Amino acid sequence: MAQNMGTADRIVRAAVVAPLLLILALVVVNSTVIGVALVALAGVMLLTAAVGSCPLYVPFGVSTCARTGTTPHRPM
């Protein structure tokens, strides 16, 4: 699977979203079905950040990677 996540997207998932989900799972809904689901979702966030590809981006054609090989538009 091709990478479709940029650096900022990966950092936000790994350093912000996953820890917040874990804290929410441990503090608010400890040992419930919702807590287990939040821990699983945190794991998915860490996995997609490590791999650099989000399967949900593919059907919508979303990519947060920086464009390479393009020249900026310069007005004449």
Image: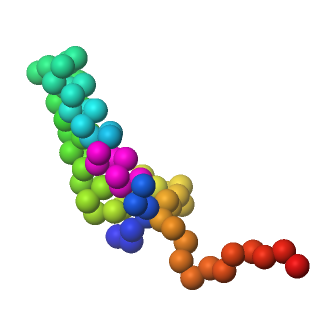
Res. 41 image quadrant: top left
In front: 23, or 32? 23
Q: Residue furthest top?
A: 28
Q: Is residue 5 above or below residue 45?
A: below
- The number of numbered discs placed on residues in the rendered structure image is 0
> Residue placed at 24% from the left, 54% from the top?
47
**Residue 34 percent across, percent down from the top left:** 23, 24
> Residue placed at 53% from the left, 77% from the top?
68
Using residue 59 as the reference point, say whether residue 51 is left or right of it: left
Residue 58 visible here: no
Question: Magenta-highlighted stretch: main secondary structure?
Answer: helix
**Residue 11 percent across, percent down from the top left:** 34, 52
In front: 75, or 26? 75
**Residue 17 percent across, percent down from the top left:** 32, 39
**Residue 4 percent across, percent down from the top left:** 43, 64
> Residue placed at 29% from the left, 45% from the top?
15
Residue 75 visible here: yes
Q: Which residues are magenta?
A: 9-15
> Residue placed at 54% from the left, 60% from the top?
61
Res. 40 image quadrant: top left
- Quarter of the image that includes the C terminus: bottom right
In front: 67, or 44? 67
